Every structure is written in structure tokens, then in C-alpha cells.
Image: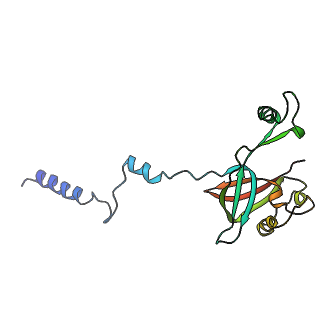
Amino acid sequence: MGGRALLVALALVVAGCGGGAGEGASPEPTQSQASTQTTSPPAPTPVEHFGYIRSVSTAGPVATLAFDEAQFLTGQQAQKAAEEDGVVPPGEPVPNDYYIRNPDKTTRTLRIANDAKITAKRCQPCRNGQPGQLGPFLASFMKGRQTYADPYRGKYSLYWLTIENGEVVAVDEQYVP
């Protein structure tokens, strides 16, 4: 075999053995493989829902609540919806510039995260706007009617729930005059 043929044969053997890369080295991913390896599903976005917490249960391994979703409307939206629903005659303003629309009173059961945040950002009279604690908040649903003098109003108030992956991660109380 000539010198030239020997060099070509040697080059082919080296290329077949990984082309000089370290032993056991993984081949470089193709561009399409690289993009699929780094792509991951987007993180779930927490979504806020308004409504009524009709009851809570602490009997199981995780606390749950029965949530009746509604719409909290203000301004022109409140006016239009209240007129459509026959709550106020056309042109008569809605009281306190808000209207709660709740045509479907069915509830859905949601798990409550053990570290759910209890806040009063929308309710200054509630605990002077200060955050609350999950245990006393849940216990308030077992009591009779409460007022803004009480730290929690249980089922006698309105709430905004932040839901992530089907679980309540935050509860904010809504003030209504």
C-alpha cells in the first residue's frame, strides 16, 4: 500500500473512532435536538378569581374550600350589567359604583395550599389591611356572622382567590360598603 493510501486509511479509522474526541464522549446534539432539549413547558401562571367562599373543610389531609365564582364590576361595566340584569332602571346609578354579578351559584372544591397567603389589600378595615393567618381564617367559617371589628368574616365576606395548578395560593378579602 502506498503512503498516500495508508494515510487515507488511517484517517478513516481515526474518524470512525470518534475523530479524536475523548473516549466515551457524547456526540454533539444537532440543532433540532438542542432546541428540544432546552425547551420546557411554560410555568403555570397564577390566576385571580373573585367570588364567595361558601364553606371550608379541614377534615382531610389538605384543607379545601367551596368557591362560588362571581364577577365584581365597577364603573361603566357595573352600570351596564346592573341595567341588563334589571337591578337598576336605565340611567339610575348602581349603589357605591359596584355591582356583583353571580347568575350561577354552583361551587367548585379547591385545595388550599398550607402556605397560602391571607391578605387584606382590598379591605383596609380588615385587620387594618395587615396580612392574616391561614388557621384563624379557616376557623372563621365555623362561626356566626362577623363584622369588620372581627379579624376575619368567614363566609360573610367576598374574596379574590389566586389559583395556581388548581390550588389556592392566596386569598384577599374584598371590602364592600
Q: Is the residue 26 above or below the residue 87 in the image?
A: below
Q: Which of 4 and 121 is in front in this view?
A: 121
Q: Is residue 62 left or right of residue 135?
A: left
Q: Is the residue 35 above or below the residue 135 in the image?
A: above
- Total marks drawn? 0
Q: Residue at x 85, y 62 (%)?
A: 152
**x and y, in percent, of residue 97 in the image:** 87, 38
Q: Nearer the viewer, residue 160 or 4?
A: 160
Q: In which quarter of the image is residue 14?
A: bottom left
**x and y, in percent, of residue 118 in the image:** 78, 61
Q: Which of 15 and 55 is in front in this view?
A: 55
Q: Is residue 17 left or right of residue 72?
A: left
Q: Which colour scheme is used?
A: rainbow
**x and y, in percent, of residue 170 in the image:** 73, 58
Q: Residue furthest top?
A: 91
Q: Residue at x 76, y 53 (%)?
A: 52
Q: Residue furthest front?
A: 86
Q: Which residue is drawn at 83% across and 57% down?
A: 156
Q: Which of 103 and 154 is in front in this view?
A: 103
Q: Which residue lies furthest to the left in this view?
A: 1
Q: In this view, does 164 lie to the left or right of 123?
A: left
**x and y, in percent, of residue 157 in the image:** 82, 55
Q: Residue at x 70, y 54 (%)?
A: 162
